[in-house]
Image: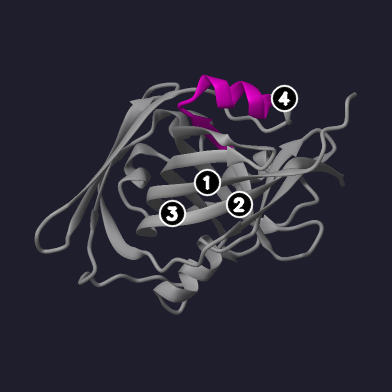
Amino acid sequence: MVRVPTFSVKLDITDVAYVTYLVPEERLRPAVPEKVPFAMTHEGKAFVSLVMFHNRNVRASFFPFIRFNYDQLNVRTYVRDPVTGKTVVLFLKSGITSRVMSFATKLLGIPWPAMSFEIHGSAEKNGVADYHAAGEWEGDVSIALREDPAGNHDYAPFRDMYEAVEFLVTPTAGLYAVPGGVTRFEVRHTFVVPSPGRAASVSFPMLEALGYLTGEELQHPHNVLLTPHGLFRVFLPPEVIRL
């Protein structure tokens, strides 16, 4: 196998939405390597998030003048890093709207299949934003969210939104399960404080087919967080960690 030199990818992410659920641990455990513990459970449940965003100005360090734009949808849970012991993201499913980037990341061992998906965010004069995402990914996906800064949000077991953000938004490494271990890459990003939101409707047949969430459960997230912009740097190629 040809060894890929170390490089990084910089990108802007915009119209970012985190839609998070508490799911019975046993539903997710088959997708999580046995030796990788969940970072936090609450009353027998673990966190799983849908994270959607535009990728803009995606450029690699070895050729910064070529840039790509595409949309992305991740389904992820939160586990203990086998390297550092800190909270990191384990991706359960990821899809992107660029066939070129899907092919390139597959060569690196990152499973990002191409899919059809569009994200639209809009702001009203009073500052309240609507967020719509829709596409086709093993079924028709449709997600409608709305900013709700004045709502009465319960973030338990987190003390408040800021503690939820610390857990859900700030991890700096990502994992994918592979036979006998995980693929791991590191990320650096700007710190963001999202606005709280609520879900108007969520349809995601793949998650129902996988047994992660029921259609009724999809309508009632634990929390919704919306942020307009962030800067990311991803360090590649990923490393395979044997467990």
Residue type at numbered disc 3: Thr
Q: Secondary structure at mark 3?
A: strand
Residues packed near mark 3 inside 10 Å, few (<14), some (14 to 19) or many (20 plus):
many
Q: Secondary structure at mark 4?
A: helix
Residues packed near mark 1 inside 10 Å, few (<14), some (14 to 19) or many (20 plus):
many
Stretch in magenta: 93-106
> Disc number at residue 127?
none
Residue 89: image location, x then y, percent: 62, 52
Verify CB contact (< 8 Å) between mark 1 and mark 2: yes
Pick whichever of labels 2 and 4 is earlier in the sequence. Answer: 4
Q: CA distance from mark 3 to mark 1?
A: 24 Å
Kindly identify which residue carries mark 2: 233
Kindly identify which residue carries mark 1: 11
| Residue at 51% over, 31% down | 95
Pick whichever of labels 3 and 1 is earlier in the sequence. Answer: 1
Name, please, the residue furthest toward the left.
125
Of residues 39 and 27, the one drawn nearer to the viewer in this rendering:
39
Verify CB contact (< 8 Å) between mark 2 and mark 3: no
> Disc number at residue 20?
3
Task: State which mark lies toward you, 1 or 4.
Answer: 1
Task: Check the picture and name the quadrant holding the N terminus.
Answer: top right
> Disc number at residue 107?
4
Q: In the rendered view, would you say 37 is above or below 34?
A: below
Task: State which mark lies toward you, 2 or 3.
Answer: 2
Residue type at numbered disc 1: Leu
| Residue at 52% over, 63% down | 190
Pick whichever of labels 1 and 4 is earlier in the sequence. Answer: 1
Task: State which mark lies toward you, 2 or 4.
Answer: 2
